[in-house]
Image (cartoon, rainbow, N blue to C red):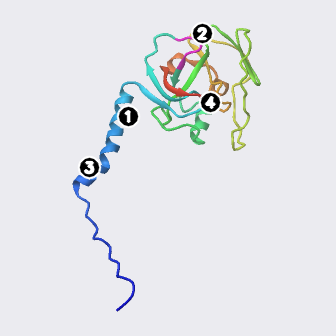
Amino acid sequence: MFGAPIRTRPPRRKLRKRDFAWILAPGAALMLLLGIGHAAGYRVNETSSAPVGLWRVAPIVELHPGMRVTLCLPPDVPIIRIAIERRYLASGECAGGYAPLLKEILAGPGDVVDFAPGATAVNGAAPHEIAVLDTDSRGRNLPHTPFGRYTLGADQYWLFSDLNPRSLDSRYFGPVTRDRLIAAATPVLTFDPR
């Protein structure tokens, strides 16, 4: 009759409908907030090709070097096809199912771009030291734009990122036509990922 007392578990409480409301409400509120933010033109950049954080996208009024833009390239562009197959890109609304890219304009119509291994110069100015990689992080072949001089046409832009040597930009897909640029992008709350 002596010994340890018998331990009993308290009876389990059944979940009621209002319990589910408390569980689901925060998630639903977050989804609603994200939806409203997206509709208002806010986007989150998680890649290291541009400062990470919250960006505002708006219709393009004018384009000039130094500004950031979002763009979609067709999925049949060789490097985009490779990027989709190898899952370099997040999923999103571009044809091919990937998210729009966020890049800086380095050069525009009429500019002369000298594209060489490790450096890209515009109109003879001091070059931007930007590496060109032959392989990805797994050692797989990575095609790039042929080295040389490019005089940009009336609706062409050279896009880049100097934050990440692995950024998918004009080093790999060449000049981009105006019709591929979707929106102007302005940082709202960001930080440099380097």
Label 4 Cα crowd, 10 Å radius (few <14 / some 14-19 / many 20+):
many
- Tell me the residue at 31%/50% (across/down): 23
- Gap in angstroms between the C-alphas marked 3 and 1: 19 Å
Nearer the observer, disc 2 or disc 1? 1
The numbered disc on residue 21 is 3
Say if the magenta span includes residue 16: no
Nearer the observer, disc 1 or disc 4? 1
Tell whether label 4 touches label 3 (CB within 8 Å): no
Q: Position of residue 179 (x, y in %)?
A: 50, 18
Q: Which residues are magenta?
A: 63-68
* Res. 157 image quadrant: top right
> Taking 103 as reference, is 122 above or below it?
above
- Tell me the residue at 68%/30% (across/down): 165
* Res. 174 image quadrant: top right
- Gap in angstroms between the C-alphas marked 2 and 3: 55 Å
Q: Secondary structure at mark 2?
A: loop
- Which numbered disc flags the more N-terminal residue, 2 or 3? 3
Nearer the observer, disc 3 or disc 4? 3
Pointer 2 residue: 109
Q: Secondary structure at mark 4?
A: loop
